[in-house]
Amino acid sequence: MQLNNTDCQKQIKCATLCHTNQGVNVMLSQLKKLFAAPSAEMLALRELEDAKRRLLEAYSYREEAECRVACYNERIERLTEYLRNVQEENA
């Protein structure tokens, strides 16, 4: 059986359309995956990562607070000593 030019063009058009539909189907399935609700495992993983970030942030705040406490303690000692010396001089 010999195909004429018109038959070849029809087969090429059909093959192209089929290939294009497969590409569209692949793209649609990828979009569905992208917008699908995350699994419970993925949600738990995200929550765990968020908790770790918040813990790290809390440690940073605690370090800062401990430094402030030490600074204020030193300031209180320095001012107390200063006032003690001033009072001794005035006495």
Image (cartoon, rainbow, N blue to C red):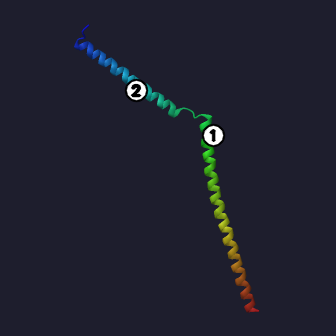
Q: Looking at this rendering, what residue extends furthest in the right direction?
A: 91
As rendered, which of 83 and 31 lies closer to the eye? 31
* Residue lying at 61% horizontally and 41% vertically, measured from the top left: 45
Q: Looking at this rendering, what residue extends furthest in the top direction?
A: 1
* Residue lying at 33% horizontally and 17% vertically, measured from the top left: 14
- Label 2 crowding class (10 Å Cα cut-off): few <14, some 14-19, many 20+? few
Q: Quadrant of the rendered structure where residue 61 is?
A: bottom right
Of the image marks 2 and 1, the number of the one nearer the N terminus: 2
Q: Indicate which disc residue 86 carries.
A: none
Residue wearing tag 2: 23
As rendered, which of 90 and 67 lies closer to the eye? 67
* Residue lying at 51% horizontally and 31% vertically, measured from the top left: 33
Q: Looking at this rendering, what residue extends furthest in the front direction?
A: 1
- Label 1 crowding class (10 Å Cα cut-off): few <14, some 14-19, many 20+? few
In percent of width and height, residue 81 lies at 72, 82
Q: Quadrant of the rendered structure where residue 67 is?
A: bottom right
In percent of width and height, residue 49 lies at 60, 46
Residue wearing tag 1: 44
Q: Quadrant of the rendered structure where residue 76 is?
A: bottom right
Cα distance, mark 2 to mark 1? 33 Å
* Residue lying at 44% horizontally and 25% vertically, measured from the top left: 25
Judged from the image, the secondary structure of the residue bearing numbered disc 1 is: helix
Horizontal placement of 34 versus 16: left or right?
right
In percent of width and height, residue 66 lies at 67, 65
Horizontal placement of 7 versus 91: left or right?
left
Up/down of 78 relative to 17, above or below: below
Q: Amino acid at mark 1?
A: Ala
Cβ–Cβ under 8 Å for marks 2 and 1: no
In the rendered image, the quadrant that contains the N terminus is top left
Up/down of 29 relative to 12, above or below: below
Judged from the image, the secondary structure of the residue bearing numbered disc 2 is: helix
Q: Amino acid at mark 2?
A: Gly
